[in-house]
Image (cartoon, helix red, strand yellow):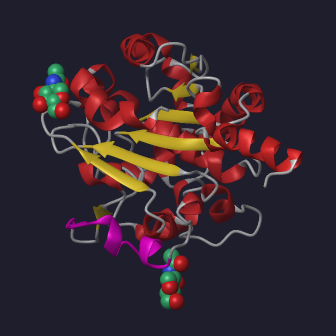
């Protein structure tokens, strides 16, 4: 005994049950580059996505490339915000963000400060999420006359904070200066209190967080920072689950994990600049999330 209305509802059921992202194909993918690079370095990644998921709209944000990537991070965040907002507004089912290295921190800051964002999946590809403390070519290029043990002197003050890498420089031997003078990472991690940012609420709007990294990276130091691990004051690595920001759930990481929406992908044999051109990494750690 079905009334016409019930019959119509029954007809609608299969439509309503379709996975929403699939109705008009794959969700758009926005790529944010890292330090000293730009869209050109992501051509292979764009090809991988278009080949495996035909019709995906992929945007590599063409902004703060190469030397400009050293600009202060909150300023870059503003620029990226303006660039990605129109893409988000057109995408009713949300967008995915794939962010490499320093770009991962820019993306975290974006999704922590955009109250209405519709970022579905955030993939941080070899990103120093818990900070950086290591002697690398990158550090040499920026501060040729400093070592990891002395960089805190240039970084932890107002002038230093105008250079992007200083804003995630996390010297485990100068913790109080880091907390006091670093104007970026401690805010994101909720290590220092702040009233204006609704980081946690905004962060938890994402549906999935995917962290990719590995021991042969060679740049991210410690490499576990790509998985939210970091050094303690003795330079022993403390893994994510034992970090204070995780235990206290200061920005929502623990909640996300309890929700089952945190996925870690660890791969050996990948150097820092090869993460985004390695097809095995793409198929193992990235492809399945970009639906
Ligand atoms: C974590 O919680 C402890 C105990 O409540 C508190 O003393 C500490 O300041 C908190 N740390 C952070 C980073 O929120
Ligand atoms: C690609 O990634 C795989 C692991 O997923 C690794 O074994 C291999 O060495 C990588 N190749 C390059 C060139 O990075």
Q: Is residue 157 magenta?
A: no
| Quarter assignment of residue 274 | top left
Q: Is residue 248 above or below residue 29?
A: below
Would residue 137 be seen by someone viewing this image from the given angle?
no
Residue positioned 36% across, 12% down in the render? 44
Residue 250 as seen in the image, left or right of residue 198:
left
Residue 247 as seen in the image, left or right of residue 10:
left
Residue positioned 33% across, 31% down in the render? 138
Residue 86 as seen in the image, left or right of residue 68:
right
**Quadrant in which the N terminus is drawn:** bottom right
Q: Position of residue 142 (x, y in %)?
A: 40, 31
Magenta region? 235-248
Residue sitting nearer the eye, 195 or 158: 195
Q: Is residue 257 above or below residue 14?
A: below
Residue sitting nearer the eye, 225 or 206: 206
Q: Position of residue 73 (x, y in %)?
A: 60, 40
């Amino acid at each position: 005994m079905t009334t016409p209305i019930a019959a119509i509802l029954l007809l609608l059921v299969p439509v309503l049950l379709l996975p929403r992202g699939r109705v008009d194909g794959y969700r758009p993918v926005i790529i944010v580059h890292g330090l000293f690079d730009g869209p050109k370095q992501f051509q292979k990644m764009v090809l991988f996505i278009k080949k495996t998921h035909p019709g995906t709209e992929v945007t590599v944000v063409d902004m703060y490339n190469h030397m400009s990537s050293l600009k202060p991070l909150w300023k870059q965040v503003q620029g990226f915000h303006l660039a990605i907002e129109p893409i988000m507004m057109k995408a009713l089912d949300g967008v995915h963000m794939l962010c490499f290295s320093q770009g991962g921190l820019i993306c975290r800051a974006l999704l922590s400060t955009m109250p209405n964002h519709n970022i579905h999946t955030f993939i941080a590809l070899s990103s120093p999420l818990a900070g950086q403390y290591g002697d690398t070519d990158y550090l040499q290029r920026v501060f040729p006359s400093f070592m990891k043990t002395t960089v805190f002197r240039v970084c932890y003050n107002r002038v230093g904070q105008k250079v992007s890498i200083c804003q995630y420089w996390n010297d485990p031997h100068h913790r109080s200066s880091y907390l006091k003078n670093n104007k970026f990472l401690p805010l994101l991690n909720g290590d220092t209190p702040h009233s204006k940012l609704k980081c946690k609420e905004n962060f938890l709007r994402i549906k999935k967080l995917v962290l990719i990294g590995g021991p042969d990276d060679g740049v991210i130091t410690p490499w576990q920072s790509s998985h939210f691990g970091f050094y303690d004051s003795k330079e022993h690595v403390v893994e994510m689950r034992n970090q204070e920001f995780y235990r206290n759930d200061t920005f929502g990481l623990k909640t996300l994990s309890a929700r089952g929406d945190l996925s870690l992908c660890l791969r050996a044999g990948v150097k820092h600049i090869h993460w985004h051109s390695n097809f095995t990494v793409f198929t193992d750690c990235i492809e399945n999330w970009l639906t």
